[in-house]
Image: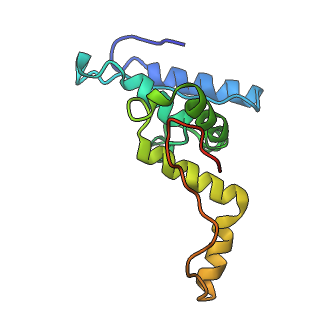
């Protein structure tokens, strides 16, 4: 969906409400959106696309803190990371570093894998017991242009 118009006429409010109602009706719907910056003009024509890619790869903290996405949508976007990360690695590795910051993506994938496998809970228990040394489990991505194993 593309929405444009003069500043201050309610474009963001319209899109936000549309997304809220649509997500209430469809539990599987995720919403990601990007905005152009009127202050920079044509200085960054890819900004909306980068914002969308960042959200689809789990970078939702800023928008959640500003209240521009709901907690429910943030959870859905976070869950979508397992699909979007695989798609980027398999189909569009050239997007990493251009539309998706590499360091942030690797960090989010690592955190996601740790939470899915229970590794983060295990390390917290070991830290609390004073037993945390070097864990034999590791998450390593050697090349973002080839298919990583998790």
The answer to whether 100 is drawn above or below residue 116 in the figure is: above
The answer to whether 83 is drawn above or below residue 61 in the figure is: above
Residue name at image x 56 percent, y 34 percent = 89
* Residue 24: image location, x then y, percent: 73, 30
Residue closer to the observer: 6 or 127 = 127
Indicate the colouring scheme: rainbow
Residue closer to the observer: 92 or 31 = 92
| 45 to the left or right of 126 | left
Residue closer to the observer: 33 or 141 = 141
The answer to whether 91 is drawn above or below residue 89 in the figure is: above
- Residue 124, picture quadrant: bottom right
**Count of marks overlaid on the render:** 0
Residue name at image x 58 percent, y 40 percent = 70
The quarter in which the N terminus is drawn is top right
Query: Which residue lies most toward the bottom here?
Result: 130
* Residue 132: image location, x then y, percent: 58, 82
- Residue 7, picture quadrant: top left
* Residue 25: image location, x then y, percent: 76, 26
Residue name at image x 24 percent, y 18 percent = 41
Residue name at image x 59 percent, y 89 percent = 130
* Residue 14: image location, x then y, percent: 52, 20
| 16 to the left or right of 34 | right
């Amino acid at each position: 969906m593309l929405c444009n118009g003069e500043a201050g006429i309610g474009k963001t409010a319209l899109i936000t409400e549309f997304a809220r109602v649509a997500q209430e009706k469809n539990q599987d719907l995720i919403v990601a959106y990007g905005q152009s910056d009127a202050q920079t003009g044509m200085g960054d024509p890819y900004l909306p696309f980068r914002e969308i890619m960042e959200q689809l790869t789990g970078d939702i903290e800023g928008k959640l803190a500003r209240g521009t996405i709901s907690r429910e949508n943030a959870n859905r976007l976070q869950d979508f990371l397992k699909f979007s990360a695989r798609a980027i690695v398999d189909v569009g590795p050239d997007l990493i570093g251009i539309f998706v910051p590499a360091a942030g993506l690797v960090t989010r994938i690592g955190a996601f894998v740790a939470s899915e496998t229970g590794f983060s809970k295990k390390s917290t228990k070991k830290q609390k017991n004073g037993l945390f040394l070097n864990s034999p489990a590791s998450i390593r991505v050697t090349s973002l242009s080839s298919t990583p194993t998790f």
